[in-house]
Image (cartoon, rainbow, N blue to C red):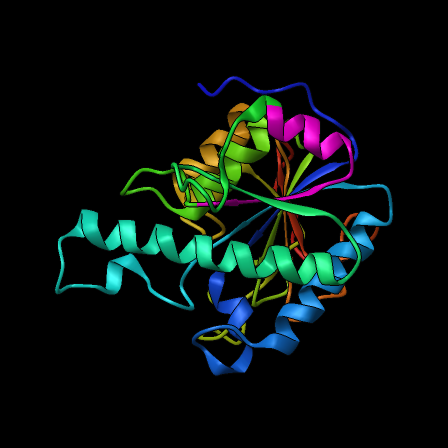
C-alpha cells in the first residue's frame, strides 16, 4: 500500500491526456489550446487552490503503438514525451501569471529536478503549480497510475481527471446512443464493471487512500475551475455507491 501524506482540503491533482494539448490537430502542441488550459489552471489557482498536474505524452508518442521497438523502449519514449509536455505547460502557466515548476520521475540533470514528495508538498504550500513528468519512471505503468501516486504522495484531497466526455457512462457514449451517465459510483463499481475511467492500478491506489476521483469534460477548459464547486459537472468516484442520471 502507498503511504498517504496528510490530506490538504485545498490541494488537487489534475490529470490531463497529452492529446488534449494537441487540440483538433491530434499531434504535437497547439498554442491556443495550451494557453486556454493554462489560463484555466491559473483561474483554479486563484481560488487559493494548490495544484499538481500529471500530463500524458500521447500527442507525441504512445508507447503501446510503437510495435517496431521493444516494449520497454517504447514506454521510455512515452515517458520522455510527457516531459516535453510538462515543460510546455510550465511555461504556459507562467505566462498566465502563476509560478510553476516541473519534477521528473527520473533524473534529467540541468533541465528539471527529480520528484521528491516532501519538497513537492512544501512548494505546493507556497502556491507553486507543480507538473509531474516522466510517469512513474517505470515501464508498464500508465500516467493514470502516476497521477494517483503523486496525488496520494502529496496529500491531495481530490484527483481531477479531464476527459473528452462529460463524465462516466455505463457504456461508450460514442458507440451506444442509450449510454447512461453515472453521476456517482464507487471504486469497486469501476473495477467490477470494467469502466475505462482510469486503469485498475490507479483506481485501486485511490480506493486504498480514500481519494475521490472527479471525471469531467475538459474540452471546455473553464471546467477546470468550475468542477470543484459544481457537483453537477462530471462524475465522482468515491466510497459511495452508484447513482444513475
- The answer to whether residue 31 is seen in the rendering is yes
Q: Residue furthest bottom?
A: 25
**Stretch in magenta:** 119-133
Q: Residue furthest right?
A: 47
**Picture quarter with the C terminus:** bottom right
Check if residue 130 falls in the magenta segment: yes
- x then y, percent, for residue 193: 43, 47
Q: Splitting the image into 4 quarters, where does residue 196 fall? A: bottom left
Q: Splitting the image into 4 quarters, where does residue 150 fall? A: top right
Q: Splitting the image into 4 quarters, where does residue 74 fall? A: bottom left
In the figure, is residue 159 to the left or right of 55? right
In the figure, is residue 139 to the left or right of 9? left
- The answer to whether residue 170 is seen in the rendering is no
Front-most of residues 87 and 164: 87
Check if residue 22 falls in the magenta segment: no
Q: Does 65 appear above or below 56?
A: below
- x then y, percent, for residue 231: 79, 50
- x then y, percent, for residue 69: 14, 59
Q: Does 134 appear above or below 92?
A: above
Q: Does 39 appear above or below 153?
A: below
Front-most of residues 154 and 215: 154
In the figure, is residue 158 to the left or right of 172? right
**Picture quarter with the N terminus:** top left
Amino acid at each position: 500500500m502507498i503511504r498517504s501524506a496528510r490530506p490538504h482540503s485545498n490541494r488537487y491533482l489534475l490529470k490531463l491526456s497529452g492529446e488534449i494539448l494537441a487540440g483538433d490537430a491530434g499531434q504535437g502542441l497547439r498554442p491556443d489550446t495550451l494557453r486556454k488550459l493554462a489560463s484555466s489552471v491559473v483561474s483554479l489557482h486563484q481560488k487559493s487552490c494548490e495544484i499538481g498536474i500529471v500530463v500524458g505524452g500521447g500527442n507525441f508518442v504512445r508507447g503501446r503503438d510503437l510495435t517496431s521497438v521493444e516494449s520497454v523502449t517504447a514506454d521510455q519514449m512515452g515517458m520522455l514525451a510527457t516531459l516535453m509536455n510538462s515543460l510546455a505547460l510550465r511555461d504556459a502557466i507562467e505566462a498566465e501569471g502563476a509560478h510553476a515548476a516541473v519534477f521528473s520521475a527520473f533524473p534529467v540533470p540541468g533541465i528539471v529536478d527529480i520528484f521528491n514528495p516532501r519538497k513537492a508538498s512544501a512548494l505546493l504550500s507556497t502556491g507553486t503549480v507543480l507538473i509531474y513528468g516522466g510517469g512513474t519512471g517505470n515501464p508498464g505503468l500508465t500516467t493514470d497510475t502516476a497521477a494517483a501516486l503523486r496525488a496520494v504522495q502529496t496529500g491531495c484531497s481530490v484527483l481531477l481527471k479531464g476527459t473528452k466526455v462529460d463524465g462516466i457512462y455505463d457504456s461508450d457514449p460514442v458507440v451506444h446512443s442509450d449510454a447512461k451517465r453515472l453521476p456517482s459510483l464507487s471504486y469497486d463499481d469501476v473495477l467490477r464493471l470494467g469502466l475505462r475511467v482510469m486503469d485498475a492500478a490507479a483506481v485501486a491506489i485511490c480506493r486504498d487512500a480514500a481519494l475521490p476521483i472527479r471525471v469531467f469534460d475538459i474540452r471546455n477548459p473553464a471546467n477546470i475551475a468550475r468542477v470543484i464547486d459544481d457537483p453537477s459537472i462530471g462524475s465522482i468516484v468515491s466510497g459511495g455507491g452508484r447513482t444513475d442520471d
